[in-house]
Amino acid sequence: MGPTTRRTALLGTASVAGALAAGLTGSTASAATYDDPAELEAAYDVTLGLWAERLGSGRRVAHRPDRRFPLLSTFKVLAAAAVLRSGADLDEVVRYDDSDVVDNSPVTGARRRVSYADAIDAALRYSDNTAGNIMLARIGGPAGLTRFLRGLGDRTTRLDRTEPTLNEALPGDERDTTTPRAVAATYARLLLGDGLGTRDRYLLRAVMQGSTTSVTKLRSQLPAGWWAADKTGGGAYATQNDVGVLFTPAGERIVFAVMSRTDDPDRSGDPQLMVDAGRLLAARLG
């Protein structure tokens, strides 16, 4: 199976998974409603960054949009885009050994070989960390990803380390960070703009639509008929992210980045924060 055919096959598989994931929206698990990001920030005692824009309407919601936050696993979309942009043969198989397997690798941990197509799928649908590192190795590591971003016009986002240390999230450390405004713009260019060719753009969106990590969080609050191409992340200091694009039945598109952290190394992220963030975005921009 050649590169083009493999891309088509992966697109078909991702579309089925995405359709299943899209059917899980519309939950009303929480009664809390926050009309302003500052209220959400205070309620969860976190530092919250948010940038969301309904394209073409001028409507937006912003809170600390230019503050730096750890990228966490949201880098995986950027790495997948760089692999696709490189023209990689998605059928090419990468072999690795036990020492290459890191925590949170539900797909690659059970194998010792994986194609680039399967690495992209594992990283974006299941947030598989070893798959993330395999993609990084293909594009020249963290420095290669940062160069790719600079080529897209993103002068802010940077990756310095691999999984799992990039999730360290030390307060004040600018390594492996971005801002909500910057990463939202880069996701928009890749998923909606000219950052990728048409086939690869639709492939990336379809695989992201099949994500399993957002369906009980931000996606659970989307109105019926909406769907998302997004990527979550989590790390130390109660860091949590969700970045992507929301699509409405009318064809409108909302680019968003929700990022949060604390300075407490003993705290864990509360997934309900992203549930309430999803409700806020739907209410303000729906």
Image: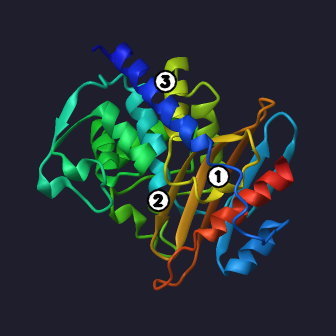
Which class describes the residues within 10 Å of circle 1: few (<14), some (14-19), or many (20+)? many
Choose between 282 and 148: the one closer to the eye. 282
Residue at 46% from the left image edge and 49% from the top image edge: 75
Q: Earlier in the sequence, mark 3 or mark 1?
A: 3
**Quadrant of the image containing the N terminus:** top left
Residue that mark 1 sits on: 219
Which class describes the residues within 10 Å of circle 2: few (<14), some (14-19), or many (20+)? many
Residue 42 lies left or right of residue 156; in this view the side is right
The amino acid sitting under disc 1 is Arg
Mark 1 vs mark 2, CA separation in Å = 19 Å
The amino acid sitting under disc 3 is Asp
- Which tag is nearer the camera, tag 3 or tag 1? 1
Q: Position of residue 102 (x, y in %)?
A: 25, 59
Mark 2 vs mark 3, CA separation in Å = 23 Å
Residue that mark 2 sits on: 72
Residue that mark 3 sits on: 200
Residue at 45% from the left image edge and 55% from the top image edge: 73
